[in-house]
Amino acid sequence: MERRSFPALVAATVILFLSATAQPAAGAIVEHTFIVGQMNMTHLCKEMLVTVVNGQLPGPVIEVTEGDTVVVHVVNKSPYNITIHWHGVKQQLNCWADGVPMITQCPIGPNNNFTYTFNVTGQEGTLWWHAHVAYLRGTLHGAIIIRPRHGVSSYPFPEPHREIPIVLGEWWQMDLQKASMDIKYSTADDDPSAATINGKLGDLYNCSGVKEDGFVLDVEAGKTYLLRIINAALFYEYYIRIAGHKFTVVAADANYVSPLTTDLLAVAPGQTLDALVVANAAPGRYYMVASPNQPPKPDFQHPTFTTRGIVQYTNENHSNGGSSGPGAEGPLSRNLSVVAPEMPDEHDTMTSYYFHGKLTALHPSRSLPVPARVDEHLLIALGLGSVCKRGQSCNRGESEETFTLATMNNISFELPAATAAGPLLEAHYYNTGSLDMLRELPDRPPRMYNFTDPSLIPSGPREASLEATSKATIVRRFRHGTVVEVVFQSTAMWQSDSNPMHLHGHDMFVLAQGLGNYNAATDVAKYNLVDPPVRNTVLVPRLGWVAVRFVANNPGAWFVHCHFSFHLSMGMAAVFVVEDGPTVNTSLPPPPADFLTCYRKNNPVADEFDIRSTKSEIPDVTGA
Ligand SMILES: *[C@@H]1O[C@H](CO)[C@@H](O)[C@H](O)[C@H]1NC(C)=O
Ligand SMILES: *[C@@H]1O[C@H](CO)[C@@H](O)[C@H](O)[C@H]1NC(C)=O
Ligand SMILES: *[C@@H]1O[C@H](CO)[C@@H](O)[C@H](O)[C@H]1NC(C)=O
Ligand SMILES: *[C@@H]1O[C@H](CO)[C@@H](O)[C@H](O)[C@H]1NC(C)=O
Ligand SMILES: *[C@@H]1O[C@H](CO)[C@@H](O)[C@H](O)[C@H]1NC(C)=O
Ligand SMILES: *[C@@H]1O[C@H](CO)[C@@H](O)[C@H](O)[C@H]1NC(C)=O
Ligand SMILES: *[C@@H]1O[C@H](CO)[C@@H](O)[C@H](O)[C@H]1NC(C)=O
Ligand SMILES: *[C@@H]1O[C@H](CO)[C@@H](O)[C@H](O)[C@H]1NC(C)=O
Ligand SMILES: *[C@@H]1O[C@H](CO)[C@@H](O)[C@H](O)[C@H]1NC(C)=O
Ligand SMILES: *[C@@H]1O[C@H](CO)[C@@H](O)[C@H](O)[C@H]1NC(C)=O
Ligand SMILES: [Cu+2]
């Protein structure tokens, strides 16, 4: 179904083993070259120009052993500014490699290169990488697989026969750069055309009656498979089922969980799940289905897309003499029907709520204990609002005179302006003082309205009185070692979406979730301080809240944002700045020698603002 016309580029994957040195824990160096380029792909009878890495969708898998060093040379042959974010990799003392444009680095311009170097330490399981560029991450993403240092026999679960990345995505029949601009400037609200498993649309889709290819997983009866599931989609949380089979969830966001046996998974954008599947059903063919959920009316209804692949048993019993080549007449080819599972209703968000609430950590004693003392409490309301296109006052209530924005505590994040000399992290590192000029994320919503009152969903006079908001580059600073408790509160402002909140550079203990408005007086009693799951992306339920704790012990400037791309493009984001600690090994080292500058190539005038040549004051990064 798909025509590939990408120039034959060879992606080098080199694994060099370091000779034993004084370094006690030196791992291997895993080296990749990522060529970001465009190619034509055809699905649903339509050819689209898509931006991908090494001609692959999903992109290359990075496989490491815990303790390894990853080196990725990114060569940008696309017309876009690109950065690559290593989603969930903690980047301890290495914020420079976090890959957020204008927060941690200048973007890699067209025809430019940049090399990311980072260690993967203290994490095992599945993470992923993606472009941190608005909707372009929809086609620029791939898996990161981290195996234990002492080999797969040290998995805290039975060693699987095979491991299979399952990347959920979407197929877009429009220019993703245009879709980002449409949502940012409230000109349109675009939708994908299909959902995908490992880039394949599956047989629910066709071009003039010819079915799209689907993902096929061949299994042998009795064997165990480890699915490494990543939700790389821009828009939806997905439910996943395989007819006739159960999953045992063993990890989430590269942290082991107590084995949870279930016939249904829920994975929100940005999240990963590792789940074992035992091929213990009657030999045959079974659909693996991924279906999205969205809030019911009165929320605005988007078209949603289900995708499916097939799990098929290959070890047919040939003892009665049947030949065994592919397509040979075994029982499978005689019976082509495929068993389909029942999926939750697309408006069933409670099944997701219960799923997320069931996860607990596997080894509470092996990881850091949940900090009992809390130094700073934040309550962050997640909602929508609007600013006037012109002037200070305008008609509200979804009028033509406003831009619709997404907010954290009633401020919508705006990237430091393009006129800034460099990324925020440099301003922080060189202590230019410009961070002091940025807006601070308030610790609480400025107004404590009834956040989850569903009557706020349809636009009307009550919402009009709440919708005015403002835009700024919002920053919240933490002293090194601060224990931070954040309660994320979803709201009903114009919509009742859940919000998958992702924190860079740190994992979060997920202490509790609830429906309605968070109430400290009663909800603290619900906290799991014994074995809470540890995640980098936490789903804040529809019309509800989640309480998390993290230790701000990784110096740098870390993006914290909703992983629904439309919410992120509309500004549901902030930057947590973690100060240096008292010692060298708690302080951010200098940027790598070949760190990109923003304007050197095309704009020599801007060089005078290059803080690495002047180390003097830089202009307010909010620009304007
Ligand atoms: C994609 O296809 C269009 C026309 O179908 C062609 O003009 C263009 O060169 C192709 N682009 C690439 C990168 O192959
Ligand atoms: C980028 O990398 C490619 C391939 O390694 C190399 O040929 C090219 O010279 C590099 N370009 C820049 C601007 O460094
Ligand atoms: C990675 O780990 C090695 C060995 O501990 C260390 O020398 C190096 O500085 C680390 N690199 C980064 C980017 O953190
Ligand atoms: C092809 O797709 C169209 C649109 O989704 C659908 O209406 C039609 O039934 C499909 N045809 C086949 C043969 O699957
Ligand atoms: C294969 O078929 C033989 C003979 O019919 C039977 O004895 C055996 O149990 C079957 N094995 C499996 C794995 O089904
Ligand atoms: C084909 O397989 C399906 C699912 O296993 C089963 O329900 C159906 O009865 C089978 N049909 C035949 C003709 O064996
Ligand atoms: C918030 O609104 C909901 C739904 O109308 C209502 O049940 C609840 O009592 C309200 N809460 C408060 C604190 O007013
Ligand atoms: C949000 O901020 C705007 C602009 O600063 C202000 O006018 C409005 O009252 C605030 N709304 C709420 C609900 O806090
Ligand atoms: C950091 O350095 C201090 C001494 O400055 C030492 O006591 C501590 O063990 C070091 N920590 C790590 C994680 O290396
Ligand atoms: C890329 O980023 C540079 C700043 O580094 C900016 O001047 C330029 O307009 C951007 N280009 C695109 C295509 O976004
Ligand atoms: Cu959101």
Image (cartoon, rainbow, N blue to C red):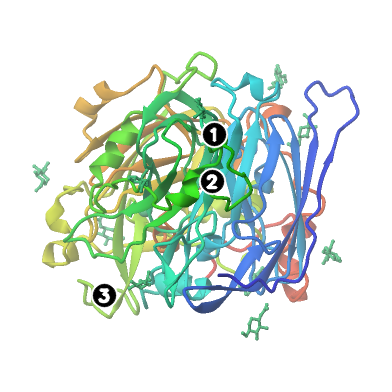
Q: Residue at x 54, y 59 (%)?
A: 199
- The quarter holding residue 21 reads top right
Specify the amino acid type for callout 3: Ser
x then y, percent, for residue 91: 64, 39
- Check whether the beta carbons of the residues at disc 2 and disc 1 lie within 8 A of each other: yes
Q: Residue at x 71, y 71 (%)?
A: 6
From the viewer's perspective, tell me whether residue 320 is left or right of residue 12.
left
Q: Circle 2: is it few (<14), some (14-19), or many (20+) Cα within 10 Å? A: some
Q: Circle 1: is it few (<14), some (14-19), or many (20+) Cα within 10 Å? A: many
x then y, percent, for residue 105: 66, 56
Q: Nearer the viewer, mark 2 or mark 3?
A: 2
Q: Is residue 432 above or below residue 402?
A: above
Question: Which dot marks residue 393?
Answer: 3
Question: Which dot marks residue 324?
Answer: none
Nearer to us in this view, 346 or 332: 332
Question: Which dot marks residue 225?
Answer: 1
x then y, percent, for residue 206: 43, 70
| Disc with the residue nearer the chain's start (2 vs 1) | 2
Furthest toward the front, the residue is 321
Nearer to us in this view, 623 or 103: 103
- The quarter holding residue 87 reads top right
x then y, percent, for residue 281: 42, 33
Q: Nearer the viewer, mark 3 or mark 1?
A: 1
Specify the amino acid type for callout 2: Leu
Nearer to us in this view, 338 or 294: 338
Q: In 3D space, how far apart are the residues under numbered discs 2 and 1 (Cα atoms)?
A: 10 Å
- Check whether the beta carbons of the residues at disc 3 and disc 1 lie within 8 A of each other: no
Q: In 3D space, how far apart are the residues under numbered discs 3 and 1 (Cα atoms)?
A: 59 Å
From the viewer's perspective, tell me whether residue 196 is left or right of residue 72.
left
State ligand 4's quadrant.
Answer: bottom left
